Image (cartoon, helix red, strand yellow):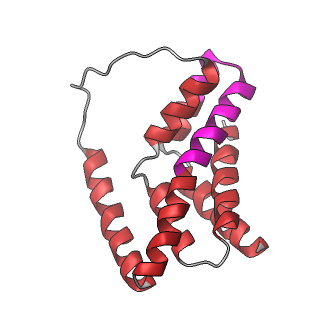
Amino acid sequence: MIQEILKAFMLIFIAEMGDKTQILAMAFATRFSVGKVLIGIGIGAFLNHGLAVLIGSYLSQMIPISTIQMVAGIAFLGFALWTLKSDDDQDEPKIQFGPIATVAVAFFLGELGDKTQLTAITLAADTSYPFMILVGTVTGMIATGCNW
């Protein structure tokens, strides 16, 4: 079980280095206290990766792991190409929340379809301990958020 946590932690920690959400964490840290930013990251990551782990666990019961890994790889490449497209033209609505909720919502939405969410799905699909994957992925996200 410890191996599951460590594997998930290391994969997420490395994948998040220089990612948009790490930069987002730095930006939030200039506006809010570090503690509130880290709590928000933890909540957003827990909800996002919790969803990913549920999806991965469910898929592993229905689809062979090799198929899941292939689809995750293709999806990863697709999202990589999608992020190359600039979306500066979009006018996004401004919604006011408290600092923790703002960070949590931003991280939840920012990680939808991201490589770390796909990693969490794939890891959860290939384990008997999905909760340990969740622990590893969330702590990896928080640790990356601390790495300013």
Image-quadrant location for residue 2: bottom right
* 92 to the left or right of 6: left
Magenta-highlighted residues: 26-48
Residue 50: give x, y in percent of width and height: 57, 54
* Residue plotted at (70% across, 25% down): 36
Q: Is residue 51 above or below residue 75?
A: above
Residue 146: give x, y in percent of width and height: 70, 39
Q: Indicate the quadrant containing the C terminus: top left, top right, bottom left or bottom right.
A: top right
Residue 110: give x, y in percent of width and height: 44, 40
Q: Is residue 122 visible?
A: no
Q: Indicate the quadrant containing the N terminus: top left, top right, bottom left or bottom right.
A: bottom right
* Residue plotted at (49% across, 45% down): 19
Question: In the image shown, does 13 or 55 lie closer to the viewer?
Answer: 55
Is residue 41 highlighted in magenta?
yes
Is residue 55 highlighted in magenta?
no
Q: Is residue 97 visible?
A: yes
Dominant secondary-structure state across the stretch colored magenta: helix
